[in-house]
Image (spheres, grey):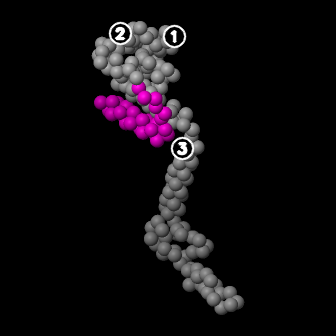
Amino acid sequence: MTTLRIPDGKARLTVSPTGTCKVCGDTFTRFKSTQTICAKLKCATQVGKLQRKAERADTKRRKDAAKPRSQYMKEAQSAFNRYIRLRDVAQPCISCGRDHQGQWHAGHFHSTGARPELRFNEDNCHKQCQPCNTHLHGNLLRYGEELLGRIGNVRVVALAGPHPPLKFTIPDLISIRDEYRQKAKELERG
């Protein structure tokens, strides 16, 4: 043990020439006073992996803190849409009744611009082919007819009824995103 003394006679710093490795527990001779692990490659590798893991977690935390609300909205909407496409995978397009190999959308009966409070309402969203959703602007007349058959008159009337306006907060959007990601995983598993 080395003790560093200064002229007033008080001991200020004590440095032990040996230490115990934080990874393997072996005793080793220190090359520097701040050394905490032995010189074995496996110990250094393990410490490096732990440091990289901690750095990645810190980077993810900082990126999440810098994300705007709109990014959380996109993630939640994407997870919701994926769930709707998986939920309705065995059904044809709600608007035209076709079953084709093209691109599928999660089409809303009441648009998210006109009725944002129904954005994440499962009764308001169904699998729809890309031509009906994009080129025919939802093909709403035929969508409404098929919607009555799928969910019934009571639930269609409930969709049309008044709804309180919603302002989704970031925690709300994270919860929605995680919920629909979990539901989609369950549907994929079978």
- From the viewer's perspective, is residue 174 above or below residue 22? above
Q: Which residue is mark 2?
A: 145
Q: Nearer the viewer, residue 190 or 62?
A: 62
Q: Which residue is mark 3?
A: 64
Q: Which residue is mark 1?
A: 135
The quarter holding residue 84 reads top left
Q: Position of residue 107 (x, y in %)?
A: 44, 19
Mark 1 is on which residue type? His
Quote the CA–CA distance across marks 1 and 2. Answer: 19 Å
Q: Position of residue 100 (x, y in %)?
A: 40, 12
Residue positioned most to the right = 7
Q: Nearer the viewer, residue 1 or 132?
A: 132
Whether the magenta-drawn stretch holds residue 177 is answered as yes
Quarter of the image with the N terminus is: bottom right
Q: Residue at x 62, y 83 (%)?
A: 12
Magenta residues (range):
163-190
Magenta span main SS: helix
